[in-house]
Image: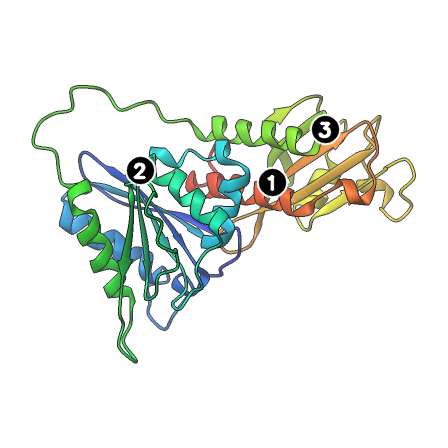
Amino acid sequence: MSITDLTAARLRRPGANGARILLIADRSWLETSDSPDEHRVPVRLLDRLWLSSRRGIELDVVCGVGRVLRILESFADAWNVGDYDAVVLLPDLGASPLPQRLQRVIDRIAEMTRVLGVCDVPFRAPAPGSAAGWRDVRIAPRAGECPAPLVAEAVSSSLLGVLQPRTTPRMLEAPKRDTVAEHLQRIAVIATSAFAVGSAAIAVLTAGRTRTLAAVGPALPDQACVRAAAVRPLLVLDAWHDTHLARDIRPQGEVRFFAAHPLELADGSAMGTISVFDTEPRVADEFDGEILRDLAVLASAELQYAGASV
């Protein structure tokens, strides 16, 4: 499997009374090995949880512990991690302790659901006042030993109480989960606020055409620049005076500022864009490309979990 910063996947095992787990793992745990199992740790973990809990399991996987925590720090409302029965953080072996500000993000998550941090060294400094939902799970692989089974066993053992099948029927219905479309619309709203623009859109490419899945504000009169941005990030500070951009992909009409970032599938191929645009031009120091990239990570994850079928 080709791993990028926008890689996400949803893995399932059937069964009643299903549980949802979010696995946030660093790249080394997700990269292809000599094994035919491309998702080395995720599949082992999925099967171990399924067998030990006797429940259906839905495992959402996303790449990059530090990056995802930074995104959740900036855009907490864009991803409701409280919908998960547990969140598992799996940094690289020997990872350095997280900065205090990201540890506070973990505390906020642990107030909503169970959070496990799995590593061979403590990557989160002790915090006596931290939320009760946090647990540090230590693994100690021997030299030459594959650590994936250790991770699967440690996590499944720690979550067994949370994932035990219910012996009595639920008295209340589970709270309604937001749909993918609602999540994408929330990301579009956040984008307009983050960049102080009048419009934002999230679109996918279908047979060479764009299909808008979420939008705020007036739409673009022409979608050529959106299709171009599916290949690489695109930034136009002032379309009326930009002489470097090809005319056929330059924003049309009253739009002067336009910025977009590709949305990617798990294999790195393009599937769409997130874009922001406005009738007022911008200068270079008014645009932070990392923010748009982070929003692209969130939107890509939602689409990959849904199989881009929304």
Q: Secondary structure at mark 1?
A: loop
Q: Position of residue 216 (x, y in %)?
A: 64, 24
Q: Residue at x 29, y 68 (%)?
A: 147
Contact? badges 1 and 2 (CB < 8 Å): no
Left or right of residue 126, residue 158 in this image: left
Mark drawn on residue 197: 3
Eye-nearest disc, 2 or 3: 2
On the image, numbered disc 2 is attached to which residue?
113
Mark drawn on residue 98: none
Contact? badges 3 and 1 (CB < 8 Å): no
User: Between disc 1 and disc 2, whose residue precedes?
Assistant: 2
Disc 3 residue type? Val
Left or right of residue 206, residue 180 in this image: left
User: Between disc 3 and disc 1, whose residue precedes?
Assistant: 3
Q: For the N terminus, which image quadrant?
A: bottom left
User: Between disc 2 and disc 3, whose residue precedes?
Assistant: 2
Q: Position of residue 222 (x, y in %)?
A: 76, 31
Quadrant for residue 286, please give it. Answer: top right
Q: Nearer the viewer, residue 294 or 219?
A: 294
Eye-nearest disc, 3 or 1: 3
Q: Position of residue 277 (x, y in %)?
A: 74, 32
* 281 relative to 266, above or below: above
| Viewer can see residue 55 | no
Q: Residue at x 23, y 36 (%)?
A: 18
Q: CA distance from mark 2 to mark 3?
A: 34 Å
Q: Residues within 10 Å of mark 3 (few under 14, many from 20)?
A: some
On the image, numbered disc 1 is attached to which residue?
207
Quadrant for residue 221, please give it. Answer: top right
Q: CA distance from mark 3 to mark 1?
A: 29 Å
Disc 2 residue type? Thr
Q: Secondary structure at mark 2?
A: loop
Q: CA distance from mark 1 to mark 2?
A: 40 Å
